[in-house]
Image (cartoon, rainbow, N blue to C red):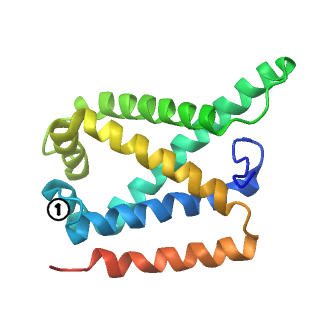
Amino acid sequence: MFLSNITDYTNTSDYLPILNGIVIIDVIVVSLIISGILRSNLLRRWYETYKFAACFLDITTFLITIIIARYVYSFWASQNNSYGFTYSIPIFIFIAILSQFAYDFVFSGVITNMPYGHNDVVDGFKRYAHKYGGFAFLFNSICMTLIILVASLISKLSLNSNIILFISLISLYPYILYTTN
């Protein structure tokens, strides 16, 4: 199989390829938004205002969600192993999307109770949630699926290659975030 198994919660060597998968998809999405190919004035303003902080929030949100999904998947797989269960990327993606939904739901509950004007970043999240609602969940689900597929592909790379890839990807952010049209 050309996709590696990145679902084992105890396999810490998967975290760098997962992080690289997240950054690859984030770099692509942010590039598409900043260039105007993906049209969203709200998101463009988000990245232009918060720059690295916005990207850091993207990366950490997806990483936390994938960590949760790996834990749930590993637990679920161990419980079902007596039935001859083997690795399944579609099931892992499904669990990751459910984890993303749960994370977004809890996060939304927390920020909903914060008044406007208390935290500028939270206000930005509220505006995004209000404007895009269900589309945001669909978009995050597509991103999550792509992240897992890319991470599963690049997990076959050596540690050295993954480190070089990570450094190269991170170095792109200033060029993308400081682009003007």
What is the count of numbered marks? Answer: 1
Q: Of the residues shown, which amino acid type is indicated by label 1?
A: Arg
Q: Is residue 18 visible?
A: no
Q: Secondary structure at mark 1?
A: helix
Between 30 and 111, the residue placed more toward the observer is: 30
**In the image, residue 12 above or below residue 90:** below
| Percent of width and height locating residue 105 | 36, 28
Q: Is residue 133 above or below residue 44?
A: above
50, above or below 84, in the image? below
> Is residue 87 shown left or right of residue 175?
right
Give the residue number, with chain letter if any, for mark 1: 45
**Rendered residue at 20%/62% (across/down):** 44
Q: Quadrant of residue 157?
A: bottom right
Residue at horizontal 23 percent and vertical 71 percent from the top = 35
Asked if one can make out residue 123 in the rendered structure from this viewpoint, the answer is yes
Horizontal and vertical percent position of residue 15: 66, 55
Estimate the x, y position of residue 91 in percent, counting from the top left: 62, 31
Query: Where, by quadrant of the figure, is residue 174 drawn?
Result: bottom left
